[in-house]
Amino acid sequence: MKKYLSHKTISFISLVFVWLSSGIVKAQNNQFYNDSYQTIDNMLNNKQKYSFKEAVFSVENAYYQGKLDTVQLNNEIRFLTKFAKTIVANRDLTYKQSDKDRVSKYAAIYSIMCQTLPIAVKDTVIQYKPFNYDFNDVFGHNDITNLFVSKLLATKKGNCNSMPYLYKILAEELGETANLALAPNHVYIKHQIKSDGWYNTELTSGMFPQDSWLMASGYIHLDAIKNGVFMKALNDKESLALCLFDLAQAYNRNFPGNDGEFVLKAVNRAIEVYPNFAKALILRAETHKEQFTKLMDKYNLKTDNPQNLKIIQQKDSTAKELMELMTQEYGHIYDIGYRQMPEEMYLDWLVSLRTERDKYENKKLMNNFTK
């Protein structure tokens, strides 16, 4: 005996379909994400004044759906900038090269980020406490806001994403630039000065490590250095590419199961600016993989059966295109020298900078920057 759906059931199913469809539209056309993308894109096209701070906060505001307190954040940045200027005015470094004024600003930001400092408030001296590395959820797997500058400012605890971002923001507020640089699972600062040329600032440990520490990770292939995947001093536009990646990643967290269109738009723009940006290349390939998996699900085919991969390509031309794209993309990521570093090994590597300080620290810079 045949069973027929009632009018109520049909209406309910229709309502659910409309609700699901509207959710996808809401995600795809989310104004906060579109605004952030446009802000960053305008900076890249020189249609809007460049500001790393504005780019970063636009991404975080998109994730918070317009509820980020940017007024308070800007007040915090102004306070730290004023504090840095006070340090510069009241401290004479042992550094004597002609770029001393610029280096003094870098040293002041370093002190704010990494050192306990006495502050005179009327007749009382209080201790300013620096920012600390937060070993809880360092990759933002559980809560992506653990990677945010706004979280760092609110808690004074951050990681290798938020801490170098804040450093760069403060440098620009002081009228200087700061180059972000990448290592496996890691972001740090590179500067070029007259006394030493290029040097590294590692905010998670409060040190100036030599390049040998970076190479000690074991996951920096020489091809990755040659191709600018790792250890490259990123210019301002390449730093904006990092913000576009952050935007795409945040979008995925806000709207899980989205169709991938906005994510691909953001990472493709990032790759245009920084062609060998490995994290963006990986996210692009992973997004295509997710689209391919959804096609497999559509035809009730399991991805773990090699025969099904042939079947899906015969059934759907889009699946064939995605297969070819993924093969090319993952191959390219390997060819440019990228190697995935296991997360548990990353933490061991990070801690090694503290435990083997004498081995990796640039002592000359430490002495020049702290006196």
Image (cartoon, rainbow, N blue to C red):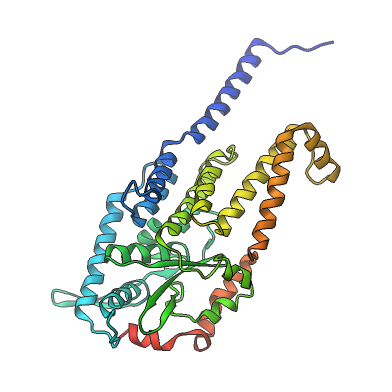
* Res. 90 visible in picture: yes
List x then y, in percent, for residue 82: 22, 66
Q: Up-down: is 314 above or below 121?
A: above
Q: Residue at x 29, y 85 (%)?
A: 97
In the rendered image, which quarter is residue 345 located in? bottom right
Say which quadrant the C terminus sits in: bottom left
Q: Is residue 277 left or right of residue 60?
A: right
Residue 119 in sight in this render: no
Residue in front for this viewpoint, 66 or 195 = 195
Q: Quadrant of the N terminus?
A: top right
Q: Nearer the viewer, residue 318 or 115?
A: 318
How many numbered marks appear? 0
> Horizontally, is 181 left or right of 167 in the view?
right
Q: Quadrant of residue 139?
A: bottom right
Q: What residue appears at the point 40 percent right and 58 percent down from the top-left corner?
A: 149
Q: Is residue 53 above or below residue 351?
A: above
Residue 195: where, in percent of width, then height? Answer: 36, 85
Occupied quadrant, residue 123? bottom left
Q: Residue 134, position in %: x, y?
A: 47, 66
x, y (%) of residue 126?
A: 24, 75
Query: Along the line of sight, which residue is nearer the eye, 269 or 284?
Result: 269
